[in-house]
Image (cartoon, rainbow, N blue to C red):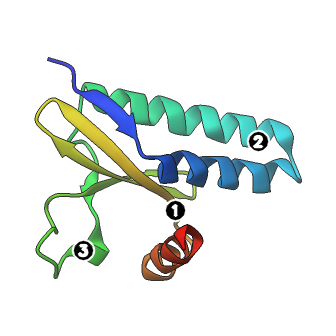
Amino acid sequence: MKARVFWTDSARLDLYDACEFIAGDDLAAALKLSEQVEKAIARLSIAPNRGRYVPELDATPVATEYRELIIRHLRVIYKPAPGVVWVHGIFDSRRDLEAALMDRLLRKS
């Protein structure tokens, strides 16, 4: 049975922001990246546990609840559950994840 894949608003905004930044230099590259990310996330419907655990969460109670896909320089953080996958965020892998999450919290304020 295929899982349904849902994106949080934050995850959609993350991808938009990343592609908008790249589009300033190379629109074709931005469009290609967006397509690659969207396809990889769509494939989670048939293999929701294919990503690795998020290393930064190892010492937390949710260490095995979240997974990530690495697509070029982006980290797609998602949470698989029976019949569903929630995409929670898309982060630049060159940035510290904790700092990126803090920026997200401040962006919502």
Q: Which mark is residue 29?
A: 2
Residue at 63 percent of width and 38 percent of height: 34
- Amino acid type indicated by mark 1: Phe
Quadrant, the N terminus: top left
Percent coordinates x, y for residue 10 in the rendering: 50, 54
- SS at circle 3: helix
Q: Nearer the viewer, residue 42 or 107?
A: 107
Q: CA distance from mark 3 to mark 1?
A: 15 Å
Q: CA distance from mark 3 to mark 2?
A: 31 Å
Q: Nearer the viewer, residue 53 or 102?
A: 102
Q: Nearer the viewer, mark 2 or mark 1?
A: 1
- Circles 3 and 2, Cβ within 8 Å, touching? The answer is no
Reply above or below: 8 against 45: below
Relative to residue 85, is residue 30 drawn left or right? right
- Residue 63, picture quadrant: bottom left
Relative to residue 47, is residue 94 drawn left or right? right
Q: Which mark is residue 56?
A: none
Relative to residue 49, is residue 28 drawn left or right? right
What residue is disc 3 on? Answer: 57
- Circles 2 and 1, Cβ within 8 Å, touching? The answer is no
What residue is disc 1 on? Answer: 91
